[in-house]
Amino acid sequence: MADLEACADHAHAWRRHGIATPLILPEDEFRRSLDAFPLEYAEIIRAHEVLFGANPFDGTIIERADLRRACETQIKSHLVHLREGFIETAGTPRAIADLVVASAPAFSALLRNIARLNGSTATDRATATREGARAAQLADGVVTDILGLEQPSALKATDAARLYPEYLTAVEQLARYVDGWNV
């Protein structure tokens, strides 16, 4: 509790300076939960910076079977969300476009997780994202279009809405890919 209270005292300053809230958990708890949060911990391991002392992640291994299972859950949840979201749009182009735009960052994360599942050690987000798309054999055009939505653009609402059928097909392909992936 003392560690949590000491960190809480710094929370406002950290937020003001754009510093992420630290993840505080005992090492044994972390190691025992690698199977429960393989994607989250893999991203932390990929992106962390050691400020001082030993690297706490040296020797950490996330099992591929755990990654595959987590990828399957994430991809199939995304697929359900896209289908349900489309129905909720009532076919309105602006609402479909909003759905596509809002889900683009999650799609990018799905692709990075596929890359990680295939052993990618890319630290650059764009590189890892493209590696995942290639591994799942997704059409480059739809990947480029959806990833482009993560950046503010002048793309008209109806243009983003027109991406939906190909986007849905790409996510269905991701689901088939992860279903057929062998550990």
Image: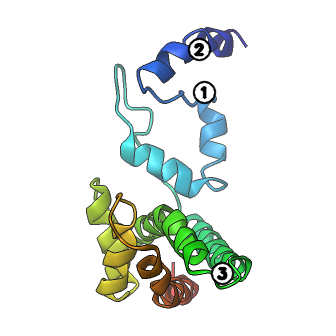
Secondary structure beneath label 2? helix
Position in image of residue 66 (x %, y %): 59, 65
Query: Dividing the image into 4 quarters, which one contains the N terminus?
Result: top right
Q: In the figure, residue 10 lies in which quadrant? A: top right
Residue 60 seen by the camera: no
Give the CA distance from mark 1 to mark 3.
39 Å
Q: Earlier in the sequence, mark 2 or mark 1?
A: 2
Q: Earlier in the sequence, mark 3 or mark 2?
A: 2
Name the residue nearer the viewer: 30 or 12. Answer: 12
- Name the residue that disc number 3 marks: 86
Q: Given the image, on which type of amino acid does mark 3 rest?
A: Phe
Give the CA distance from mark 3 to mark 2.
42 Å
Q: Given the image, on which type of amino acid does mark 1 rest?
A: Ile
Front disc: 2 or 1: 2
In the rendered view, would you say 108 is above or below 168? above
Q: Residue at x 63, y 28 (%)?
A: 26
Callouts 2 and 1 close, C-beta under 8 Å = yes
Secondary structure beneath label 3? helix
How many neighbours does mark 3 have within 10 angstroms: few (below 14), some (14-19), or many (20 or more)?
Answer: some
Position in image of residue 149 (x %, y %): 39, 67
Q: Residue at x 53, y 48 (%)?
A: 41
- Name the residue that disc number 2 marks: 7
Judge left or right: residue 1 versus residue 62.
Answer: right
- Name the residue that disc number 1 marks: 24
Q: How is colour applied across the structure in the image?
A: rainbow
Q: In the figure, residue 152 lies in which quadrant? A: bottom left
Q: In the figure, residue 55 lies in which quadrant? A: top left
